[in-house]
Amino acid sequence: MTIMCPTCKKSIEYDLNNTFRPFCSDKCKLIDLGAWASEQYQIAGKENEGLYDEEI
């Protein structure tokens, strides 16, 4: 099965032996990790959802 690398959009063969999957390389994997770490990506949701529902 052929997929596109989420970072560089290069077409790659999806292979369970590829330690970088779904990325094409370690470089693309680290670029994606850096984007999460710098908060360029976010998961939608309510701020502080469920953190303070209980009263003490």
Image (spheres, grey):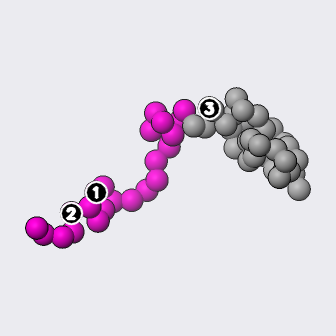
Q: Kindly indicate the quadrant of the structure image that contains residue 32.
A: top right
Q: Quadrant of the C terminus?
A: bottom left
28 on left or right of 3: left
Pointers 3 and 1 in contact (C-beta within 8 Å) = no
Instruction: Work out whether mark 3 precedes mark 2 in sequence or the reverse, and give the earlier one.
Output: 3
Report which residue position mark 3 lands on. Answer: 31
Res 48 label: 1
Tell me if label 1 and label 2 are in contact, CB under 8 Å: yes
Is 2 situated above or below 39? below
Q: Residues within 10 Å of mark 3 (few under 14, many from 20)?
A: few
Q: Is residue 41 magenta?
A: yes
Residue 10: % across, % down: 80, 38
> Label 3 amino acid?
Ile
* Quadrant containing the N terminus in the rendered view: bottom right
* Residue placed furthest toward the left: 56
- Which residue lies at the image location 46% right of the left edge and 53% below the top edge? 43
Residue 18 seen in the figure: yes
Bounds of the magenta span? 34-56
Chief secondary structure of the magenta portion: loop
Amino acid identity at mark 2: Tyr
